[in-house]
Image (cartoon, rainbow, N blue to C red):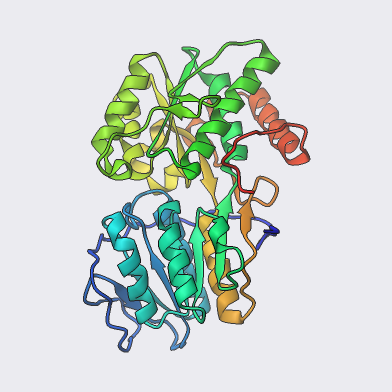
Amino acid sequence: MKKKSLLTGVAAFAALALTLSACAEAPDAGTTTGATTTAAGGASTTAAGGSDFKACMVSDSGGFDDKSFNQTSHDGLKKAKADLGIQTAEIESADTKDFTVNIDSMVKANCNIVVTVGFLLSDATIAAAKANPNVKFAIVDDNPAAAKGLTNFKPLVFNTAESSFMAGYYAAATTKTGKVGTFGGMKIPTVTIFMDGFAQGVAYYNQTKGKNVQVLGWDAAKQDGQFVPEPKPFDNIAGGKTTAQNLVSQGADIIFPVAGPAGQGGLQVAKESGGKVQAIWVDTDGCVSAAEYCSIISTSVYKGMDVSVFEAIKAAKEGTFDSTAYVGTLANGGTGLAPFHEFDSKVPAELKTELDKVKQDIIDGKIKITSVSQPK
């Protein structure tokens, strides 16, 4: 599938947490009054400005307050409501078995577009798109081959191997122990793409500087490493903490959790280290979405899910929606490194210059990233 950008740049929106809601049967599609109402099944429906157009969203099990990709994607829905004057509805999934019924509930709520959040919702979203050709669908974090030919289905994906490469280079340049660590929530492409880029960024630093910084938790050649234990690994904060502690016990002083809410366990380990360990967050600027941990988050690998969700909804409302995949890259600003925040004064000017050059060399194709999980 040919790729083109929906936008030329991304500005990160502030992340706001919402209260978790349960999920079950279809919500009542009834009338809306401009205030959020919780319908049967835990879905909420909101109206703004009297528009008949309705945009809806289904989360994965992390929920809309996960301080990560669900929350950032949800910000795009909220912006669409505020800026476009549309109705919105949303429902959170507690488990993978909820995906199909939750998507169906949004269709029954007369949604014009349904945005699903996460690779794991792919099969259920494709099935719904095939069964409901008059409803538009967009999915964050997957571009499935099985959706080829579906004109009402739009993938929103991000080449985070590029930005994670920069994070790996930064980590290798700033570690004091010579060891950095990463771990994932599950071994799925939208997780391992970060880990691949991170490891390759460390390797590039070693190559150019004649160093030997070690990456713990991920072997890019074997495509295997450390993952949060079941059940519900993305929600297992205690498991994330144990996994991070394992990496730190082996000498890692910088950790890169790619595990959704479970990654907060890694932030806890860094915060409890008394300044010996720092973390690099993913999906959104951690100093915004998890501000209580900003003192140990040196930077973050963001992806502009909020902007791509907003643009997909806007296109559906304006009649310009198409099925061409949006791919966020360093070049179009769809992914990148967040500011260093409290670490800014500690990052040498020379390293900042090197990171700028690494970024440009990736954009120009001078640096080749070989992650098998990069968007095709």
The reply to whether residue 347 is visible in this rendering is no
- What residue do we see at 27% from left, 82% from top? 28
In this rendering, position of residue 179 left or right of residue 269: right
Q: What is the tally of numbered marks visible in this picture?
A: 0
In this rendering, position of residue 211 left or right of residue 39: right
Q: Residue 6 lies in what quarter of the image?
A: bottom right
Residue 163: percent from the left, percent from the top? 59, 39
The reply to whether residue 353 is visible in this rendering is yes
- What residue do we see at 53% from left, 67% from top? 310
Residue 137: percent from the left, percent from the top? 50, 70
- What residue do we see at 60% from left, 63% from top? 148
- What residue do we see at 30% from left, 88% from top? 30
The correct choice, above or below, for 266 with respect to 373 in the image is above
The correct choice, above or below, for 368 with respect to 109 in the image is above
Residue 188: percent from the left, percent from the top? 45, 42
Quadrant containing the N terminus in the rendered view: bottom right
Residue 351: percent from the left, percent from the top? 64, 25
Residue placed most toward the observer, 291 or 355:
355
Q: Residue 258 lies in what quarter of the image?
A: top left
